[in-house]
Image (spheres, grey):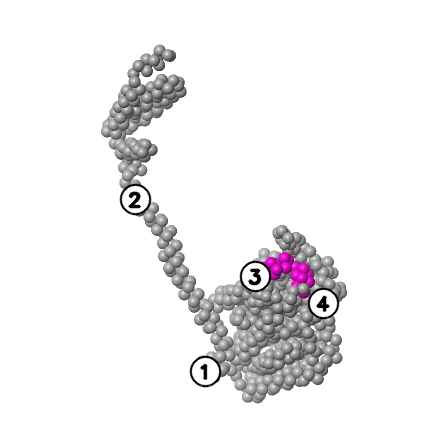
Amino acid sequence: MDNFVSTIQTVPLNHYLILSSIIFTIGVIGVLIRRNAIIIFMSVELMLNAVNLLLTAFSAYSGDAAGQVFVFFIMALAAAEVAVGLAIIVMVYRNTSSVDINILNRLKW
Amino acid sequence: MINLAWLIPVFPLLGFVINGLGRNLLPKFVIGALATLAVAVPFAISLGIFFEFTGPDAIIIPIFDWIKVGTLNIPFSFQIDQLSILMLLIITGIGSLIHLYSMGYMSHDAGFGKFFAYLNLFIFFMLLLVLGSNYIVMFIGWEGVGLCSYLLIGFWYTNGAYADAAKKAFIMNRIGDLGFLIGVFLIVATFGSATFAEIFPQAQNIVSGDANLTLITILLFIGATGKSAQLPLFTWLPDAMAGPTPVSALIHAATMVTAGIYMIARSNILFTLSPVTLSIIAVIGLATAIVAAIIALTQTDIKKVLAYSTVSQLGYMFLGLGVGAYTGAFFHVLTHAFFKALLFLGAGSVIHAMSNEQDMRNMGGLRKKLPITFITMFLGTLAIAGLPPFAGFFSKDEILAHVFEHNKLLWAIGILGAMCTAFYMFRMLFLTFWGSFRGTKEQEHHLHESPFSMTFPLIVLAVLSVVGGFIGVPEVLHGSNWLANYLNPIFEASNAKMEAGALSHSTEYALMAVSVGGVLIAIIYATVRYVSKAHVPALDSEPKSALANLSYNKFYFDEFYNAIIQKPLDILSNFFYKIIDKLGIDGLVNGLGTGSQEASKTFRLLQSGNVGFYIFAMVIGIISVLIYSLF
């Protein structure tokens, strides 16, 4: 464990911050500009994992395991979310033969 | 018998419930008999109490504890004393006669059951009013009789004018009731109690002319002006003649309208200690007496004549109260109940025979067709005119003698009013029963004497009108004035505080001679005018002298009230309706409605269904929250 922590600490905290910001931004932009539901889904996962990375980094630097525990919960939750989300996408595809989210505006009203 | 007193109001209430629920199920005879019994049985109990009660102290009959707040305790209890016993006898005695009469009078009416239910309810409330041992119970009765009066005036409510008359009576009464209610509140605030037996002993220690007491008594008197139809609130009573005639006899002549006098007589000590109020009462009473008497001179509707006569006689009672002649005023209540009920019932009998014709210009010569009605009404007229030895003479004389002691000018006007009374009553009698028949052939064909159920009450009341005065024959006429002695415990404290300047016997004889002489002159004048010259009042369309017009149109009281109260109120309500309500309140509510509708129409466009836009909005939102929290 000490070995793992010290390994993480070999990289300065700033780098982690910058990296996760970049990944998170990519995720946000992906969600905003893509219309393919699966890509949007992947972008959401990117955002989640950027946060996970940041949590682990902070956890290691402050010597508190709580952050890493959090990460496990988030991963479990994300897995569940993916199951539901993919199921929805499959249903959308079956009904519309497309995974373009703009088609979903038919659900309005 | 006294321990059965709580039963007295129970019977009419039962009668009301049974007749009210079964008005369409029970046969007419059963309804009428039940209703009459529901008043006759309490009369029997009251008689029993009258003979058993020896006094002098009042007997309190507790029913239940009603209001207990802090130190204030208002029990629901009855008070049996000389005053309430006499009122009980009047209400239940005359009440049962009038119930009996109504069985005949209302026999053709579709609302027979309803009528008797209301009548029983009225008796119930009236009994509560006189039995209550505190002002609050009295107030229940006070309001209840007002309600019944409203219901019975508007009994034929499909006629718009009658329904309006009912509303008028109710509203006019309400004005007075407000005064009464505030007066009672002040009493509770001053004495810490509403119970008669606790207030009056306390009041005796108050200095005469106390400002607070004066205010209380003026407020109570305002209540009395509403209920007992005095100036300025008297205009409802003549309109109240829209109700069936037995109602006019029972409620608007014999009982309810005397509630104000009963209330003042009951609180006599408070009034005795407020000389200012007493003067106001005397002046208002006399003004009412004379104004109403002048109006009655030219009326052509037989019931209207009697109505104004009632207002005028009530004015005399208040005049009596105002000069401290409590016994005299109450004596007049008693005798007036006899002869005015008789006159109204007689008028009802005439109207019944004339197929609902009330205009005296279309009557005449009914003497031979309706002999019993004629004789009884003749006796009633003699009684109200104040000829000895009929009932009205003694009571009116007692009041006028006290007035003379008090103020000579008031007495002179009072005598003038008495002459008017004699004139218009004989005018009514002559127009109705003398001369030749002026109605249609069809009406003449239908003329018939009323059935026994209607003539019997007339006969009983006629006997009472003749002999009723003998309970109060004054000392000067070698009587013992039984009534004054009987009521002495009630008025003792007041009489002690009033310095009684006894008139010499010769003065009293002179007063009687003047009043009887005046009345005789008025009667002779009426005889000359309506019998010898057979004068018949002109039709409405023909021009009259200015004075006659003033009297015929009731001094334009209604028009005056319309102009100064109704018109401004109408304008004000219109203003509130059109500006405040329509523009202000409706504008606000509707504005909120249309505002949110318009806003939703605009914001609805944001919900485009485009997921990308939603996410974009979300991101913008999150970023702005971040920026906000950072800086």
Q: Quadrant of the N terminus of chain B?
A: bottom right
**Label 4: chain letter:** B
Please name the amino acid that badge 2 sits on.
Answer: Lys
Residue B509 is situated, as x and y percent measured from the top left of the image, at 69, 83
Q: Check disc 4 and report the residue beneath it.
A: B489
Q: CA distance from mark 1 to mark 3?
A: 48 Å
Amino acid, disc 3:
Ile
| Residue identified by numbered label 2 | B601
N-terminal-most mark, 1 or 2: 1
Residue B277 part of the magenta-drawn span: no
Q: Nearer the viewer, mark 2 or mark 4?
A: 4
The lab-note entry on whether marks 1 and 2 share a chain reads: yes
Q: Earlier in the sequence, mark 1 or mark 4?
A: 4
Say whether marks 1 and 4 touch (CB < 8 Å).
no
Front disc: 1 or 4: 4
Chain for mark 1? B
Residue identifier under label 1: B542
Q: Residues within 10 Å of mark 3 (few under 14, many from 20)?
A: some
Choose top left, top right, bottom left or bottom right for residue B213. bottom right
Extent of the magenta region = B184-204
Residue B595 appears in the rendering: yes
Numbered label tally: 4
Mark 4 or mark 3: which comes first in sequence? 3
Identify the secondary structure beneath mark 3. Answer: helix
Front-lying residue, B519 or B181: B181
Q: Which residue is mark 3?
A: B182
